[in-house]
Amino acid sequence: RPQLLASCPGRPAEAMAEFRALCSAADEAEALLDEAEKPSFDTASHTRRLQAMDEARRTFDTLAERMPVFKQRAQETNKDKQIYGPKMVARVLELVARVEAALERADEITAELVPLRAQLQAEKEERARQAEEMQQWEAERLRQTQAAEEEQRRQQREADEFVARQSDAVRLEQQRQRAAQRQAEGVGLEPSSAALSRTIRKDLSLLQALELLEKSTGAQELRDALQVLLLLCSNAIAHPDEAKFRCVRLNNAHFLRTLGRHTGGAEALLAIGFGERDALEEGSEEPCLFMDEPSLEHDLEGWSAWFEGLKRHRDLIAARMEQLGVAALPTAVRGFGWDEAAAEQRAAASAMDDCAVLHGQRGGGV
């Protein structure tokens, strides 16, 4: 729309240009009112009617700024101040009448469109509500999917652990049976076979294994066994990346004396997460119990679950020791395993005392 220019007696050309612009604006406003009056049957046509009415209102606001000036000059009665000739006066008054009539018409159409405007606003709010509900539903569906996947992974880990425990228990039972057969044939037993020449209870929790251990040991034997169990957990927690701290050699004399020979000892190790291996190192024939560590790089979630479970086992054993007034042995120092300090200990004058630890240390590695 042409910009409306200020009119004054000394600038008739500009005043005429502004008058023409007002006439064009009035034409546009009337055309917009025609569009706003057209019947509508759907959301798109309803929206066009309302938009036309809003645009017409804005056009009338533009006309209202300058029309009073032209009307006042056209109605001037003082001949000395009159600036319009008779034809111009007639044209101005005609335009004023058109605009006033269009304004009345706009008020009527606006009133007619009130229900339609309310309907479209309600539809808009309903669409927004539905969109929000859909977004919430999608978020809930995603949460449930993630929860289901997490539960599936948890069940898979439990199933894998169950299968591993079953396999370990079967191997221990087979070793026990072989040991019993050798004993029946009069052949001397290997230390590890002698320690495990009994039926190993399967699928016991750590708490159940500890109860079995308490029933099969005296006070001092229970004290030594609990210290060994806590030390194995603490060393694995302190040094999870060192395999030597997750390994128990079945021929280790200290292990056999303090834990391996007691009912409930092997069950407790299985409950903690140890499993039997024929040998820790390639080429070795020495059997051992070994705790596998999940890959921290490829399975962070599985590693975290394994590590947290190990800490729960440690805390359970420590709580039972506190109840019985049993002190914990020092945790191992990095770099020493079961046998690194064996030569130094054999050179010592005395045998292992209460400070000796399973990984070949004395006093926590000192």
Image: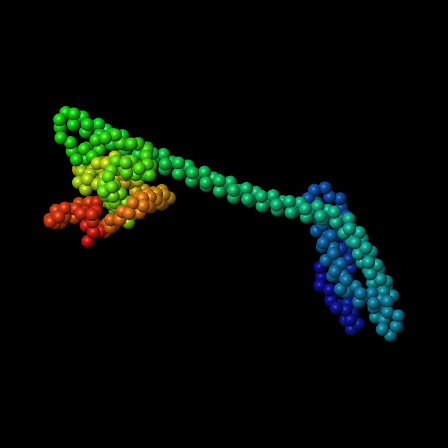
Q: How is the image coloured?
A: rainbow
Q: Give the residue at x 28% y 45%.
A: 230
Give percent across and percent down for residue 55. Answer: 71, 55
Q: Position of residue 182 (x, y in %)?
A: 16, 27
What residue sits 23% from the left and 42% below the top? 220
Compare residues 271 and 57 and report the one nearer the observer. Answer: 271
Above or below residue 68? Residue 198 is above
Q: Position of residue 4 (x, y in %)?
A: 73, 64
The image quarter containing residue 62 is bottom right
Q: Is residue 98 above or below residue 242?
A: below
**Left or right for 332, reference 208:** left
- Direction from residue 68 to residue 117 in the image, left or right: left
Q: Is residue 204 or residue 295 the one in the foreground?
A: 204
Q: Residue furthest bottom?
A: 80
Foreground of the two, 189 or 7: 189
**Identity of the residue drawn at 52% across and 44% down:** 139
17 shown above or below 127: below
Report the side of 198 relative to 126 (left or right): left
Quarter of the picture holding the N terminus: bottom right
Relative image position of residue 309 (x, y in whole percent): 34, 43
Instruction: Using the rendered view, name the quadrant where residue 195 is placed.
Output: top left
Q: Quadrant of residue 307?
A: top left
Residue 44 appears in the picture as rendered: no
